[in-house]
Amino acid sequence: MRQGEVLDFEEYVRTRQDALLRSARRLVADPVDAQDLLQTALARTYGRWDGIADKSLADAYLRRVMINTRTEWWRSRKLEEVPTEQLPDASVEDPTEQHADRALLMDVLKVLAPKQRSVVVLRHWEQMSTEETAAALGMSTGTVKSTLHRALARLRQELESRDLDARALGRTGERTTVRGDEGGRERCAA
């Protein structure tokens, strides 16, 4: 390449580098990879610079070189797959269970008296101390403790009864049937 062509290429890179880097960043996610992509494309274009007759189309030429280079990189990547006899256990966070628990808790809270509900919400949801709860509700700390104790016992009782109802209806995943015989009724898991 002649000296004039080299200077022309250097001037082109100086003036168009930012725009070309933006194009490279659209092609690859990592900014460092985008810089590498642009440098590789510029190195490949340097040897063919004098063959580009219309220099106003140099951006398009370089973008095509970047696309081709990225495609080559993608095709030549090495996959890190290792065959095994058994697949590893992969747990996935499933918020469905958490949402169902929260919905059940909100529903069960409705069985409490308003005073009990207030104590439970302030102590466990808002995480207030016994003294803060007593001050907020205008009652003594002893009343807060006894009300909380009775409310939690009521919630446990309600949750247990709902769990038994769910098992009887077979909603827990196993099919349950009830058969009658001379000795009475017996429960069988099918």
Image (spheres, rainbow, N blue to C red):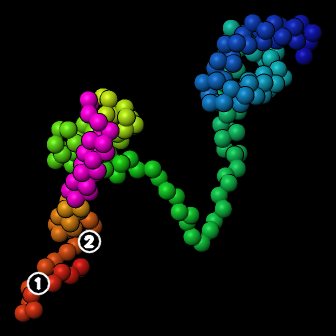
At 56% from the left edge and 64% from the top edge, which residue is drawn? 88
Q: Which residue is mark 2?
A: 174
What secondary structure is found at the residue carrying circle 2? loop
Question: In the structure shown, which secondary structural element does the residue marked by tag 1 occupy?
Answer: strand
Q: Position of residue 59 (x, y in %)?
A: 68, 15
- The answer to whether residue 155 shows anywhere in this view is no
Magenta stretch encompasses residue 78: no
Q: State left or right for residue 31 relative to residue 183.
A: right
Please name the residue shown 9% across and 87% down the image: 184
Question: Residue, x 37% and y 34% (percent of image)?
Answer: 131
Q: Residue furthest right?
A: 3
Please determine whether, in this image, residue 36 is positioned above or below residue 157.
Answer: above
* Residue tagged 1: 185
Mark number displayed over residue 87: none
Cα–Cα gap, marks 1 and 2? 19 Å
Tell me the mark number nearer the camera, choosing from 1 and 2: 1
Q: Amino acid at mark 2?
A: Glu
Count of number-bearing discs: 2
For label 1, count other residues whose C-alpha is less than 10 Å away and answer few (under 14), some (14-19) or many (20+).
few
In x, y percent, where is residue 35?
74, 24
Q: Which SS does the magenta portion mostly show?
A: helix
Q: Quadrant of the C terminus?
A: bottom left
Name which residue lies at 20% across and 56% down. Answer: 158
Q: Is residue 8 visible?
A: yes
Q: Amino acid at mark 1?
A: Arg
Res 4 quadrant in image: top right
For marks 1 and 2 on the same chain, the one whose residue lies earlier in the sequence: 2
Q: Return the residue nearer the eye: 170 or 108.
A: 108
